[in-house]
Image (spheres, rainbow, N blue to C red):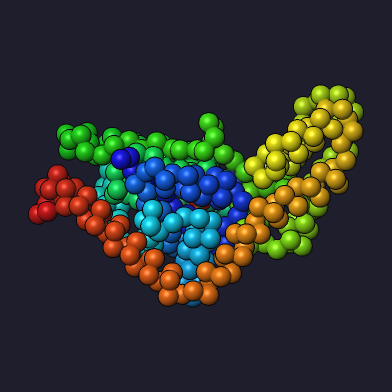
Amino acid sequence: METVVSGIRPTGNLHLGNYFGAVKSFIKMQEDYNCFFFIADWHSLTTHPHPENIRKSVKTILAEYLACGIDPEKATIYVQSDVKEVAELYLYLNMNAYLGELERVTSFKEKVRKQPDNVNAGLLTYPSLMAADILIHHAHKVPVGKDQEQNMEMARKFARRFNTIYNVEYFKEPESFHFSEKAVKIPGLDGSGKMGKSEGNAIYLVDDEATIRKKVMKAVTDSGPTVPNSEKPDVIQNLFTLMEVVSDPSTLAYFNEQYNNCAIRYGDMKKQLAADINQFCAPIRERIVDLSQNNAYMEKVAREGAERARESAAKTLREVREIIGFRA
Ligand code: TYM
């Protein structure tokens, strides 16, 4: 059976981008693959969070994973920092990662621009840690959104390089996985590109009806098309892209037709979109509330997940140490 690995950084609540870019695939894949889904708490240290915030955010993501339908009976759910072998593999991969290639990673360059006062080595070597997460379980497939393509390219490169340096066929090259044919990028509704927590434009799975409505109604639009069948500007396409993932296909077809006939009323479209987002989020929201009160259950899930993940990771590390020339 093929293996799947993926993770999400605990930096707050899950938003629609996380769900449609990653979690939706997790839920599907757990039925047919040997799955490892983790909470990437080591990755979140690049921004120096307060210990209390880490504890809270890890618990939040765990509750949200479960509320979305990731099933601990089918998939191994764990917290990254519970599996110390990952840090050892990260060390080995860093020895084969070159400054030039790490500095060329787009998300690193963006961070250098946005936070020049905190360009730490963890940010620079983020792709090595991510590769360690993936290679530690020999993943065949990694469900991620479009923004992770370059990190995935690096993971494949580090796998190949390890094999070349030690003249072995040990690590597999992992592939990205998307539930549709192409990589998913859920847009924000402020016209600024992708939906994200740091972009401040996210709709969260826990948002209540009024909050969702407020966020959607505020979305940027234009004065409407004047020529039939014209191409949609980005801000308008964003509304349609969201509708594509949360609404019924007939609803999407109706508003497309209205757009193409120059009869579209964006107010109506936004009301419908807000209602459909709410309908999608409501059951998840309820389960998040229930689960958040069940600490004992979440503790048990994290403990059992860590045990299973450690077993798989320890086997890899024994083999890797042997290949490198250390005592296994
Ligand atoms: P993170 O925590 O930023 O995001 C988690 C997942 O959500 C996807 N995503 C989106 N997809 C589509 N549209 C969006 N607007 C959107 N916003 C977020 C991301 O692509 C990602 O799949 N480096 C990773 C975490 C990570 C990881 C790993 C993933 C660490 N190690 C190993 C896979 C395998 C990250 O920062 O994702």
Q: Is residue 295 visible?
A: yes
* Residue 282 place in picture, x, y as percent: 66, 59
Residue 318 shown left or right of residue 39 in the figure = left
153 vs 205: above or below: above
Identified at 33% across, 43% down, the residue is 3
Residue 211 shown left or right of residue 175 in the figure = right
Q: Is residue 99 visible?
A: no
224 vs 74: above or below: above
Quadrant of res 167: top left
* Residue 308 place in picture, x, y as percent: 29, 58
Identified at 38% across, 66% down, the residue is 302
Work out which quarter of the rendered image holds the N terminus and state it.
Answer: top left
In front: 163, or 226? Answer: 226
In front: 235, or 62? Answer: 62
In front: 94, or 221? Answer: 221
How many numbered marks are there? Answer: 0
* Residue 58 place in picture, x, y as percent: 47, 66
* Residue 271 place in picture, x, y as percent: 81, 50
Residue 15 shown left or right of residue 272 in the figure = left
In front: 166, or 32? Answer: 32
Identified at 81% across, 30% down, the residue is 257
Quadrant of res 14: bottom right
